[in-house]
């Protein structure tokens, strides 16, 4: 991930350099959001792991909606059009559990992502209130941790495996913003379409994670609601 962050840092530096040379205006925009996640193949894997216990297991978490965090740096191409770079991170997870008088068992599927990308957006309206249309594209890097714990009377055991996957995303969105001098709060709503390769074991890319003889991939597709606070710098 280090080289990807380096690229992002260089891009931010170039935008700031343009501003320093009097060549434009840009916005720095921390953002916070909530996302829903498809994760259909992960849910199949979760069910298989539960069936493998041979007991009446319970799914306590099934990859629910969860928060994401990010940072956007935008260059104002014109008064209405912006080109932006962004970094975002988020997570979700699942759990299968069983417990009775003799012991207990838990199996966790913890999945998280980091994404870097760019988008174009256009503002509509006059004055301080603006409506926004945008299209965001990104590279998405996923990490999965499978962790199980078992306790039967005095016996205890645990296992942990880490997997990785990568893919891309495309998110059309709409939004509304209100300018207060150089501060600009914004709310956007979009839908992320995600396509990723299959999870592979961190220690060997040839070892692919499977469920019922089918490869397992993350699917971060779903609704995205974001709230951000932009700080406008420049003319």
Image: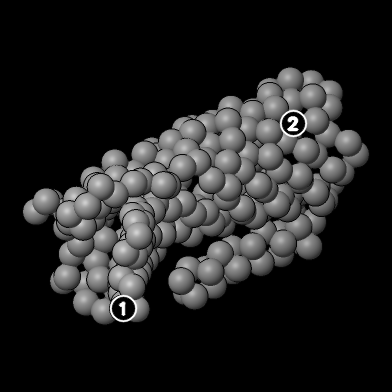
- Dot 2 or dot 1: first in sequence order is 1
Please tell me how many numbered marks the rendered image carries.
Answer: 2
186 shown above or below 30: above
Q: Disc 2 versus disc 1: distance between alpha carbons? A: 58 Å
- Front of the two marks 2 and 1: 1
Residue 99: image quadrant is bottom left
Residue 4 on image: x %, y %: 48, 68
Residue 228: image quadrant is top right
Residue 219 appears in the figure:
no
Q: Which residue is mark 1?
A: 155
Say if mark 2 contacts mark 1, CB within 8 Å.
Answer: no
Q: Which residue is mark 2?
A: 177
Count residues near mark 1 (Cα–Cα under 10 Å), then give few for <14, some for 14-19, many for 20+.
few
Count residues near mark 2 (Cα–Cα under 10 Å), then give few for <14, some for 14-19, many for 20+.
many
Q: Residue furthest left?
A: 213
173 sits left or right of 29 in the view = left
Q: Residue furthest top?
A: 125
Residue visible at 71% across and 50% down in the picture: 29
Residue visible at 79% across and 56% down in the picture: 22
Q: How is the image coloured?
A: one colour
Residue visible at 63% across and 33% down in the picture: 188
Q: Nearer the viewer, residue 128 or 220?
A: 220
24 sits left or right of 193 in the view = right
Secondary structure under the numbered disc 2 in the rendered image: strand
Q: Nearer the viewer, residue 199 or 187?
A: 199
Q: Nearer the viewer, residue 101 or 21?
A: 101
Q: Residue furthest right?
A: 181
Residue visible at 49% across and 33% down in the picture: 223
Secondary structure under the numbered disc 1 in the rendered image: strand
């Amino acid at each position: 991930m280090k080289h990807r962050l380096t690229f992002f840092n260089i891009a931010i530096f170039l935008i700031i350099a343009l501003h320093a040379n009097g060549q434009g205006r840009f916005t720095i925009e921390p953002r916070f959001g909530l996302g829903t996640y498809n994760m259909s193949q992960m849910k199949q894997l979760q069910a298989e792991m539960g069936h493998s216990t041979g007991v009446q297991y319970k799914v306590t978490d099934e990859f629910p909606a969860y928060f994401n965090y990010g940072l956007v740096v935008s260059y104002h191409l014109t008064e209405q059009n912006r080109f932006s770079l962004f970094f975002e991170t988020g997570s979700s997870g699942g759990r299968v559990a069983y417990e009775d008088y003799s012991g207990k068992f838990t199996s966790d599927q913890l999945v998280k992502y980091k994404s870097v990308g760019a988008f174009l957006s256009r503002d509509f309206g006059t004055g301080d209130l603006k409506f926004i249309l945008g299209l965001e594209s990104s590279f998405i890097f996923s990490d999965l941790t499978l962790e199980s714990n078992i306790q039967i009377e005095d016996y205890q055991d645990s296992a942990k495996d880490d997997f990785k996957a990568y893919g891309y995303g495309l998110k059309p969105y709409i939004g509304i913003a209100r300018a207060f001098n150089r501060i600009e709060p914004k709310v956007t709503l979009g839908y992320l379409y995600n396509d990723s390769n299959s999870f592979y074991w961190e220690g060997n890319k040839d070892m692919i994670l499977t469920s019922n003889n089918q490869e397992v991939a993350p699917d971060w597709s779903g609704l995205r609601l974001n709230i951000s606070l932009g700080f406008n710098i420049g003319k």
